[in-house]
Image: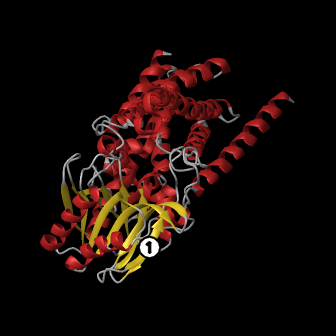
């Protein structure tokens, strides 16, 4: 049990410590060794998986305590956060626990056991993002966001493909170790070679992709992302619009940008219904003739929306995107007297400068949302967010890791404009082109390309999980037939 707890704790650590993440390619092997040694004891397998998953999720979601919800929950905020921490950990932990146990116990030839283990693990991670309460945070591939050669596989199969490769390498190492203990040298050498081959092959592919994609990237447009650093928990965001306006106009004069990005929640209201508010943003656009993309939330068309308004050089509202994925319990109607209205179409804003995709805050956690935006024609993607509800840098850094993976998956440049940080620009291979220090005022000026090359992930999406499921079914049938033949 101690090994399961230690492995779960180390796995959770890797989400926030990039320096430790490369070691995760072998660090889960001891957990799988114990599972394999005790696979005949079903109850023990479940207990061991429960300890691993419980430790992983309890540590990971402890970051909930940095969320300031006192304005919503008052003195009960501590209890609400504790219940949320325990609830999410229990639900998602139970899903992964069941997946690990299923992968170990489903009928299958033992030398191919890695296939069902990987399939059920991927299935669990897919389930995290399903439905109105979806929260796809604890996906193993996110640990590698700072280890760029290892994460390029996301361009082939998304973040979950990187996670499956991690699981496969660790499981094969565990099998190799047990063969060595049993003095079975040939299978030991074979399984070790396969594990090293997967790891090395993934690194070689990643290194190749980083070199080739970087060579063909042609920065063409200048983007200024404003980080006005006004905390919502401290003063409700008071004065943010005036500060954002001043910083944006200064950037327009000094940087001569093609785009100016203002974070989520830059203003309250609607640019369609409030002429004064519209004129504020129009003044920014006219300063330099740039497109201004601003995060605004409020009532638009008698619906409560979290929106991104596009203002053209002439000061007119050219387009508007309304957030699709709403934050559970905060934007989906559980707290408000009437429901927020979600958009149903990907956010693609067509301009004379090209087609820009838009994701608002929580949406960048969803690989399918970014992929749908890219498939709909986005040549680059802008993320507008307000992470000031979290104290410290842990959660904003996790959010930035999600944005990094979305860039690799889609093959697009991403620029994230965040109220208090992290404001950054990411290349199609996940390289950070520039960033601002969190909790500071600043404007990030960066040149990006609008000539993307579609990745295989945009074509196939997560279909590979279904293919892996078919393989597992075939292996289960094979095992059943062999068992039946032996019984005759």
Q: Which residue is at the far top?
A: 2
Q: Position of residue 121 (x, y in %)?
A: 56, 39
54 is higher (above) or lower (below) than 249: above
Q: Is residue 41 visible?
A: no
Quadrant position of residue 234: top left
Q: Position of residue 163 (x, y in %)?
A: 47, 44
Q: Nearer the viewer, residue 1 or 376?
A: 376
459 is higher (above) or lower (below) than 165: below
* Residue located at (37% from left, 47% from top): 399
Q: Nearer the viewer, residue 64 or 93?
A: 64
Q: Is residue 120 visible?
A: yes
Q: Nearer the viewer, residue 314 or 363?
A: 314
Q: Is 106 on the left-hand or right-hand side of 434?
A: right
* Residue located at (69% from left, 42% from top): 475
Q: Position of residue 206 (x, y in %)?
A: 35, 55
Residue highlighted by disc 1: 272
Q: Is 211 on the left-hand or right-hand side of 178?
A: left
């Amino acid at each position: 049990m101690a090994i399961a707890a230690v492995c779960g704790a180390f796995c959770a650590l890797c989400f926030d410590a990039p320096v430790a993440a490369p070691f995760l390619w072998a660090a889960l092997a001891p957990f799988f060794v114990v599972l394999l040694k005790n696979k005949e004891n079903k109850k023990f397998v479940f207990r061991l998986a429960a300890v691993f998953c419980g430790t992983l999720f309890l540590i990971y979601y402890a970051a909930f305590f940095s969320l300031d919800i006192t304005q919503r929950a008052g003195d009960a905020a501590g209890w609400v956060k504790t219940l949320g921490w325990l609830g999410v950990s229990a639900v998602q932990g139970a899903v992964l626990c069941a997946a690990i146990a299923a992968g170990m116990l489903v009928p299958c030839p033992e030398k191919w056991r890695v296939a069902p283990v990987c399939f059920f693990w991927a299935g669990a991670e897919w389930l995290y993002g399903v439905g109105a309460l979806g929260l796809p945070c604890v996906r193993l591939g996110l640990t590698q966001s700072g280890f760029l050669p290892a994460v390029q596989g996301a361009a082939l199969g998304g973040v979950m493909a990187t996670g499956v490769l991690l699981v496969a390498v660790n499981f094969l190492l565990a099998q190799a170790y047990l063969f060595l203990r049993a003095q079975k040298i040939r299978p030991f050498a074979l399984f070790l070679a396969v594990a090293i081959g997967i790891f090395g092959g993934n690194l070689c592919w990643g290194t190749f992709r980083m070199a080739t994609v970087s060579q063909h990237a042609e920065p063409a447009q200048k983007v200024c992302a404003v980080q006005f650093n006004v905390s919502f928990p401290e003063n409700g965001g008071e004065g943010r619009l005036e500060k954002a306006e001043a910083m944006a106009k200064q950037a327009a004069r000094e940087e001569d940008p093609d785009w100016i990005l203002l974070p989520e929640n830059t203003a309250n209201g609607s640019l369609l219904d409030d002429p004064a508010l519209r004129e504020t943003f129009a003044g920014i656009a006219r300063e330099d003739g740039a497109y201004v993309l601003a995060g605004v939330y409020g009532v638009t068309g008698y619906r409560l929306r979290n929106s991104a308004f596009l203002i053209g050089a002439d000061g007119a509202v050219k387009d508007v995107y309304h957030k699709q994925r709403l934050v559970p319990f905060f934007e989906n109607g559980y707290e408000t007297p009437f429901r927020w209205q979600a958009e149903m179409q990907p956010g693609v804003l067509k301009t004379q400068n090209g087609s820009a995709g838009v994701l608002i805050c929580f949406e960048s956690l969803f690989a399918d949302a970014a992929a749908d935006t890219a498939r709909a024609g986005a040549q680059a993607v802008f993320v507008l967010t307000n992470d000031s509800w979290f104290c410290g840098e842990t959660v904003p850094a996790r959010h930035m890791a999600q944005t990094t993976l979305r860039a690799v998956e889609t093959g697009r440049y991403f620029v994230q404009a965040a109220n208090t940080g992290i404001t950054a620009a990411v290349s199609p291979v996940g390289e950070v082109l520039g960033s601002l220090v969190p909790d500071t005022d600043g404007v990030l000026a960066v040149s990006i390309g609008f000539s993307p090359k579609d990745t295989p992930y945009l074509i196939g999406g997560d279909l590979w999980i279904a293919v892996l499921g078919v393989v597992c079914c075939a292996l289960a049938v094979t095992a059943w037939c062999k068992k039946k033949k032996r019984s005759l």
